[in-house]
Image: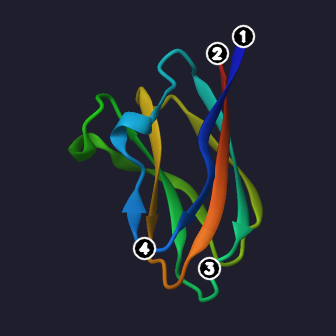
Amino acid sequence: MAASFRMQGLFNVSSNQAQDHRDAIDVGSYRHVVIQCRVATKDTQAGGTLVIQAANILDDGAFVDVPNVSVNLFTDTNKMLRVSDTARYLRWRVLGLTTSAQFMLDALGREG
């Protein structure tokens, strides 16, 4: 069984920030999650990175970066990210942004 999630609708980010923990998606029932990130407007200077974070509880302090799951907001336009055996909640975080960027995220959760 699989389920689709809109992790983030088209969003303009102009500073380093993280998705509000209350908007994180619950993927606790899924062993594998595939996230598609579409970058509509790229960061005009190198440096901006979108990372996926995971946590077992909905608390800002609990979220940690998932290793090797990121999108370069300067060079990438459409990227698939894969996360397996993760914590219950997933959200995004942008760091190193120099100007601004627009992106959206869709996810698909699949059972073992």
Q: Is residue 52 above or below residue 28?
A: below
CA distance for labels 1 and 3: 36 Å
Circle 2 packing at 10 Å, graded few (<14), some (14-19), many (20+), is few
Q: Position of residue 30 (x, y in %)?
A: 57, 19
- Residue highlighted by disc 3: 43
Q: Residue at x 57, y 59 (%)?
A: 70
Q: Closer to us: mark 3 or mark 2? A: 3
Residue extending furthest toward the right: 78
Query: Amino acid type of disc 4?
Result: Ser
Q: Quadrant of the C terminus?
A: top right
Say which element carries label 4: loop
Q: Residue furthest top?
A: 1
- N-terminal of the two: label 2 or label 1? 1
- The disc, 1 or 3, on the residue closer to the chain's N-terminal end is 1
Numbered mark located on residue 111 in the image: 2
Which of the two discs, 3 and 2, labels the residue nearer the N terminus?
3
Type of residue at label 3? Asp
* Disc on the earlier residue, 1 or 4: 1
- The CA distance from mark 2 to mark 4 is 35 Å
Which residue shows up at 76% across the image and 66% down it? Answer: 77
Q: Is residue 41 above or below residue 66?
A: below
Mark nearest the camera among 1 and 4 is 4
